[in-house]
Amino acid sequence: MRFRIYVLFTTPEATKAALQHAEKLSAGLNAEIALILTPVVPYPLPLDEPPTSLDLAQEQIRSAANSVDHEVVGYILLCRDPLNTLEHALSPHSLLLIGLKTRWGLSKTERLARALRRRGHDVILRTT
């Protein structure tokens, strides 16, 4: 199995920056880059019926993947809780890159990154 670098989709701009960083990190490693999008489906809806179109999610992945020369494998993981879903989807001690917009205060994404680190994953935050 090839070494895999995971990139978590946040915003289009921040995700593209994280993908470009993942591409640099993968140079010479024969590493696979996996882009993960975790749309949250609210509890009143069935899990397989997200409030936004899966076509939109696929287009977001396609657009972000086109920003780098490296091949990117995309995953859409419909969920109620992104942390729980990522914990089940990722291999132990996975490497994740997460793009962030520069801002004051601790964002949901930064809290997710901290929780993933506590669970043993290596997380790199890339600010735009």
Image (spheres, rainbow, N blue to C red):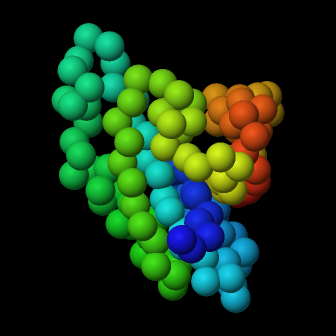
Where residue 36 sits in the image (x, y, percent)?
A: 47, 52
Asked which quadrant contains residue 95, the reply is: bottom right
Compared across the picture, whether 93 is left or right of 55 comes to right
Report whether residue 11 is seen: no
User: On the rendered image, what quadrant is the N terminus found in?
Assistant: bottom right
Along the viewing direction, whichever of 22 and 13 lies nearer the viewer? 22
Report whether residue 43 is seen: yes
Asked which quadrant contains residue 5, the reply is: bottom right
Q: How many callouts does the rendering have?
A: 0
User: On the rendered image, what quadrant is the C terminus found in?
Assistant: bottom right
Q: Residue at x 49, y 43 (%)?
A: 89
Q: Is residue 45 above or below residue 79?
A: above
Q: Residue at x 26, y 36 (%)?
A: 52
Where residue 14 sits in the image (x, y, percent)?
A: 60, 55
Q: Is residue 52 above or below residue 76?
A: above
Along the viewing direction, whichever of 40 and 63 lies nearer the viewer? 40
Give the residue at the far front of this rendering: 1
Give the residue at the far top of this rendering: 44
Q: Is residue 23 above or below residue 82?
A: below
Compared across the picture, whether 73 is left or right of 98 comes to left
Where residue 64 sits in the image (x, y, percent)?
A: 45, 65
Q: Residue at x 67, y 78 (%)?
A: 26
Along the viewing direction, whichever of 48 and 125 lies nearer the viewer? 48
Compared across the picture, whether 55 is left or right of 16 comes to left
Q: Residue at x 68, y 82 (%)?
A: 29
